[in-house]
Image (spheres, helix red, strand yellow):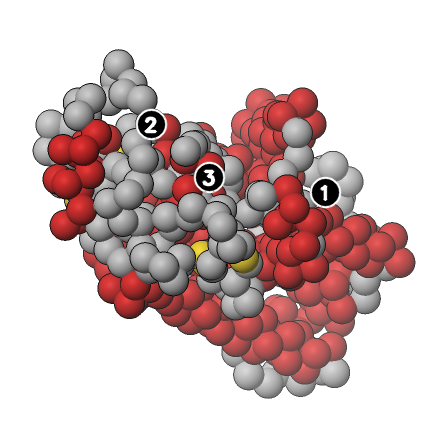
Amino acid sequence: MSSYELGKGIEMSTNPLLSEATITAPAEGQDDLSPGNPANDGADDRAVVRASDPNDERGTDRAALRAALKPLVLKGPAYRARRARIENLRLGVQLASLAVIVWIGWQFTRWVFALQAGRLEGTRPPGIEGFLPISALLTFRHWLETGEVSRVHPAGFVILGLVVATGLLLKKAFCSWLCPIGTLSESLAAIGRNLFAPLLRRMRAPRVRLPRWADLPLRSIKYLLLAFFVYAIFVKMTPRDVALFLGSPYNKVADVKMMLFFAQISTLALKTLVVLIGLSIVVPYFWCRYLCPYGALLGVTSLLSPLKITRTPKNCIDCGLCAKACPSNLAVDRATRVSSDECFGCLSCVAACPVPSALAVETPAPWRRAVRPTVFAALVVVLFFGGINAARLAGYWRTEISEQEYLRRVQEVNAPKYSHARGSVPEYGRGD
């Protein structure tokens, strides 16, 4: 029996924020050994192991192997409880992060509307600058060249640095644990799984997957977009251009312009948004996998991460459930250490594995220490939110722009001096 056959009978979870699949009973007559089969409620000792691989540490005595692995395999309630703990852990972090971001958006929107009405009401949340990645990249270049952090949008610079830091240390955990777009994409993917469940069952596939000839070129788009921004900011622009942009009237109200873009969204932008949502329902994680430059940046930095999903072949029963749970369609069940730039660090594969000692996040050799899911979650939260608190204490969080200046600028936000074209801004004077 192949590893694929061991995992048949997959039915999609109804919770849009949980991981890729839950396992259900197979059709009558199927010899399914997955952890959801009520006949054995776990991968049991009947599991058939694939022929030994030259790189695999297992021997050829399958009977002895099955006997040795039997005590390690979680079944029934124990398996379901462990999987739920890991999935709910990430779900809790996602919801908490999303709640913070929604609160920031609501607070900022009320503040801008009050300014438009000529009132100073509420306060501007600095966290809104997390949605200004271009300004953050320009601030980063300015910092590299001058050693000074522009005080126009310092929080954006801090958030960019912390996002990159998570990529360097914790794979693309920012995408799967903290990013609101990642959470939205996961919810849309779950809607698609439920819509196409009959088709997926006939295909014996956990999700819709584009053919390789289409997937690879599309995945390159996000890297091309990242290359464009890197070229435009770090090659094409001179230090004077960077300083001119950072101090420009446009950059000073870039957060307000961004909010007004969505509050007064054009027909074309709305249609584009609807198309992206539709594509994300049909093809899971369409934006994240193919178009997000932030994801491309984290994909590159994540290659250096010391923590990676690691499979221990001698403890693996070849059920293939880890590969089926992976939202990036990675062949986790055939890898020893997952180094792919597409690994989200979501731990869906770890949660799906019925043998806890077979798959885990681990430090590199020669230490090879497993990192428990709770510890991994704590590292994500402490690194990101702890970094924000450190920036606050160091004075690199709040803008130097006063509320009175914001009030004046919002009143004239449609003036020509608040425009830009391909990174270029109109000349402005000291009083602007």
Residue at the extreme top? 54
Give the image location of residue 14, x and y in percent. 55, 67
**Residue at image x 32%, y 57%?**
40
From what the image shows, is residue 300 above or below residue 409? above
Q: Which mark is residue 5?
A: 3
Residue at disc 2, secondary structure: loop
Residue 41 x %, y %: 33, 59
The quadrant in which the C terminus is found is: bottom right
- Left-right relation of 52 to 92: left
Residue 288 visible in this rendered orientation of the protein = no
**Left or right for 135, reference 351:** right
Q: Amino acid at mark 3?
A: Glu
Crowd rating for badge 1 (residues with CA inside 10 Å; few <14, some 14–19, many 20+)? many
Q: Amino acid at mark 2?
A: Arg
Which numbered disc covers residue 50? 2
Quadrant, the N terminus:
top left
Give the CA distance from mark 1 to mark 3: 60 Å
Which residue shows up at 52% across the image and 62% down it?
A: 13
Looking at the image, which residue is at 24% across and 45% down? 45
Mark found first going from the N terminus, 1 or 2: 2
